Image: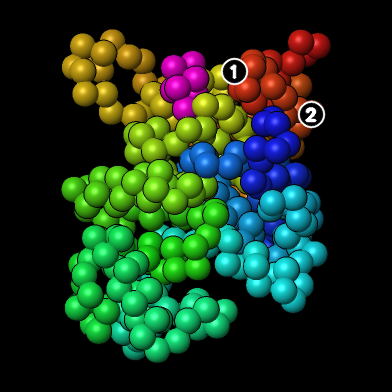
Amino acid sequence: MASKENVILEVKDLKKHFHIGKQVVQAVDGVTFDVIRGETLGLVGESGCGKSTIGRTLIRLYEATSGSVKFNDQDVYKLKGKGLNQFNQKMQMIFQDPYASLNPRMKVLDIIAEGIDIHGLAKGEERRRRVVELLEVVGLNAEHADRFAHEFSGGQRQRIGIARALALEPDFIIADEPISALDVSIQAQVVNLMKKLQKERGLTYLFIAHDLSMVKYISDRIGVMYLGNLVELSDSDSLYDEPLHPYTQALLSAVPVPDPEVSRTRERIILEGDVPSPINPPSGCRFRTRCPHVMDICAQEVPEWKEARPKHWVACHLYNEDK
């Protein structure tokens, strides 16, 4: 992976299982990746693959079942007291639903200043000045501070959510499908705002989404998830130009292409069957029940997470030399 000094987040064999009665949902089951300081790492996959669970587990909204997460070389799950407070300031989250994530009983001023209040960073006029400054940074204005969330459009609400995430001057922001609830015309505005803020403030993003075109636009590297596992990870150009994993190939074959000539000649890969249940996933490779290249070994052994090409990681038996 990346050199140690450039890594802001290091995730090793992360697992998050949920117990429902006697059943265990393996939402995330052994995920390993690094995030490089200043980059945007995109995380994509079908609904239910575990990508949002990863984001919530990294920031400790969920406690991990096992595995380790290091942020700025500190073990996130061992942090307490002052160290935990510092972590909560330096890692923030933008939530998927701009309607559900803002308290309808609070004015925008208090929503954005909530973290400032918790950490005792400012009071009175200084508190208001900070909030107004943040509103202007995200393209809103001072008068919006005294309104309630229901008075805003979806795009404006998401800008408020971004301002709230910026209030504690974080280094790392987890954006959990921040544009999926917005109109297409507004999506581009929000993504461009995030890119602008990243450049100005040196932010690092984990950008979780299912829109592959938008993920390519904003991401430096992209990880692909399937049923709780990471199946491929590389820089965005390599992933789109030459995907290695059969699941990634199928996903990308469905992305609309603006060139009619290319669209007519491109082969669409249709996957058979449904995504298996995370309560009872298939043995070996979890994708084998839908894979067009399935082999006997796929049912017997979990594929190794390996660097099949320089800086291009994949978990697939097709790339094991001794298969």
| Residue 122 versus residue 188 in the image, above or below | below
Which residues make up the magenta segment? 236-242
Q: Residue 319: horizontal and vertical position, in percent?
A: 68, 15
How far separated are the C-alphas under marks 2 and 1? 15 Å
Kind of element beneath mark 1: loop
Q: Main secondary structure of the magenta part?
A: helix
Quarter residue 318 falls in: top right
| Residue 85 versus residue 49 in the image, above or below | below
> Does residue 90 appear left or right of residue 113 in this picture?
right
Q: Residue 50: horizontal and vertical position, in percent?
A: 58, 50
Q: Mark 1 points at which residue?
A: 293
Q: Which of marks 2 and 1 is nearer the N terminus?
A: 1
Which numbered marker is on residue 301? 2
Q: Is residue 207 visible to us here?
A: yes
Are there few (<14), some (14-19), or many (20+) residues within 10 Å of tag 2? few
> Does residue 230 appear left or right of residue 186 in this picture?
right
Q: Give the amino acid type for the residue marked by disc 2 in the picture.
A: Glu
> Does residue 101 appear left or right of residue 9 in this picture?
left
Q: Nearer the viewer, residue 307 or 282?
A: 307
The verdict on residue 209 being magenta is no
Q: Residue 142: horizontal and vertical position, in percent?
A: 23, 75
Q: Give the amino acid type for the residue marked by disc 1 in the picture.
A: His
Are there few (<14), some (14-19), or many (20+) residues within 10 Å of tag 1? few
